[in-house]
Each structure stands twice: as C-alpha cells, then as structure tokens.
Amino acid sequence: MKKNTVLAVDDTPEVLQCIDTILQDNFDVRLAVNADSAQEVLKTTPVDLILLDVEMPGMSGLALLEKLQKNEAYKKIPVVFITSNMDDKIVKTAIKKGAKGYIVKPFTSEVLLESVKFFCM
C-alpha cells in the first residue's frame, strides 16, 4: 500500500528531523528548509499534506500558503501550520487564508502523528 506523502517546511533542521522521525514509519516524508525549497519539492512530488512553519526567513509560511491557494495544482493540498506563535491574529489569518489546522510547538509525537493521520486519511 502506498504511503501518503507529507511535506514538512521549517527553517529549523532539528524540527524537520523530529517530524521526519515521528512520521517516517507511516508516511513518505519530504523536508524543505524554506518556501523556495518547498516549491521545488512540489514541482516534482505529489503531496497529500503540507506541514508549514509560519515564521521563516524569506517568504513566510502565510505568504507561501497564499501563493499555493492561487495555484490550481496545489490549492487542494491541506496545509497545517506548525508553529510556536500563538498570536490570535496569525491563527485567524492562517485559517482565513485556507489553513486546515494548527499544531503548537513544542508538540508531542502523539499529537503530530494523530493530526497528520486525520488530515491524510
């Protein structure tokens, strides 16, 4: 059976490694350190879910989400933000722009795995 593909985008390598370790047994995990590398992955790999950090150097996660929503090829891919920023304005903006969920850092293995299963199944 084919595993669902999850693209994790975060500028912190330790966070990406943690996500990969938690999800790798159940999902095909692709990692990107910024919005540009995420867009490169999307050009070559069909993705079932994007886990996206809000605050990154260069293009923010919110700006990337907005860009993805304008592209027919990507706008149906669910995006879940993973961030330590719990500013209500940012949460509301993310939801308005089309985010399907929000996971707060630091997260537990169980919360991440169950959230990803929920959005991929």
Image: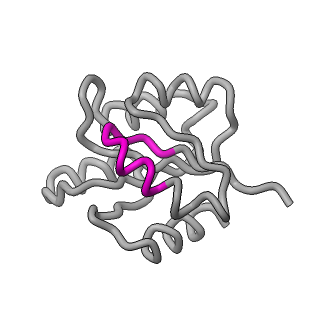
| x, y percent for residue 93 | 25, 48
Q: Nearer the viewer, residue 72 or 81?
A: 81
| Residue most extreme to the right | 1
Q: Is residue 43 found left or right of 54 in the rendered image?
A: right
Q: Residue at x 57, y 70 (%)?
A: 118
The residue positioned farthest toward the bottom in the image shown: 110
Q: Which region shows up in magenta? A: 8-19
Q: How is the image coloured?
A: one colour
- 100 left or right of 61 in image: right
Image coordinates of residue 23 in percent, x first then y, are 57, 61
Question: Is the residue 77 above or below the residue 115 in the image?
Answer: above
Could you tell me which quadrant the C terminus lies in?
A: bottom right
Left or right: residue 64 versus residue 76 is left
Q: Is residue 69 above or below residue 106?
A: above
Q: Horizontal and vertical percent for residue 33?
A: 40, 33
Horizontal arrangement in the rendering, residue 107 relative to residue 6 (left or right): left
Q: What residue sits 15% from the left and 52% below the top?
A: 89
Pick the residue in front: 97 or 103: 103
Q: Is residue 39 magenta?
A: no
Tell me where residue 117 appears, x and y as whole percent. Answer: 59, 68
Q: Is 64 in front, or is 92?
A: 64
Q: Quarter of the image holding residue 1?
A: bottom right
Q: Residue at x 34, y 55 (%)?
A: 82
Q: Residue at x 52, y 53 (%)?
A: 20
The image shows a total of numbered marks equal to 0
16 in magenta: yes
